[in-house]
Amino acid sequence: MPNPVNWFEIPVQDMNRAKEFYTAVFGYQFDMMEKGPLQLAMFSGSEQSAYGATGALAKGEGYEPSTTGSIVYFGCEDVNVELEKIEKAGGKVLFPKTSIGEHGFIAHFIDCEGNHVALHSMK
């Protein structure tokens, strides 16, 4: 059975600022796409990967950054590496690297657009 999530969209108000933030923190590159009035900056990745999901930054009517609702966890090698970059890139760390036992470590932050987002690593 596949993982339940195969796509996500993170709402943004300023697409360029958001792309710069996610590039500064994670090193991501983006492919731009427009679907009518909706503007998408798709994260680099593979939809054929057996692990994780891919998604996009999304700007358009009805897309409002939020600190409530679903939280997207970005996988990384070591949560501390990305945590060191978040505030320099315009975000805010909500809580630092925290053990979740045998499942690794997490940390939560607010991105430059005001979205509550998180990190996960095994080390």
Image: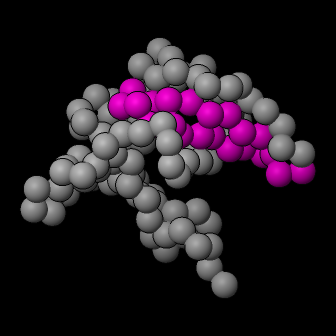
Residue sitting at x 28%, y 49%: 63
User: Which residue is drawn at the image coordinates 28% and 28% (left, top)?
Assistant: 17
Q: Is residue 4 left or right of residue 13?
A: right
Instruction: Establish if 27 lies above or below 59.
Output: above
The magenta stretch spans residue 109: yes
Residue occupying the far top of the picture? 88
Quarter of the C terminus within the rendering? top right
| Left or right: 105 as drawn, with respect to 47 | right
Q: Nearer the viewer, residue 22 or 67?
A: 67
86 in the magenta segment:
no
Q: Position of residue 62 (x, y in %)?
A: 24, 52
* Residue 77: percent from left, percent from top: 68, 41
Across and down, in percent, residue 18 comes to: 32, 34
Identified at 23% across, 33% down, the residue is 14
Furthest toward the front, the residue is: 68
Left or right position of 72 against 121: left
Give the magenta part as a residue range.
102-123
Q: Residue furthest left?
A: 36
Q: How many marks?
A: 0
Up the image or down, 69 lies above or below 114; here it is below
Here the colouring is: one colour
**Quick check: can you spot residue 30?**
no
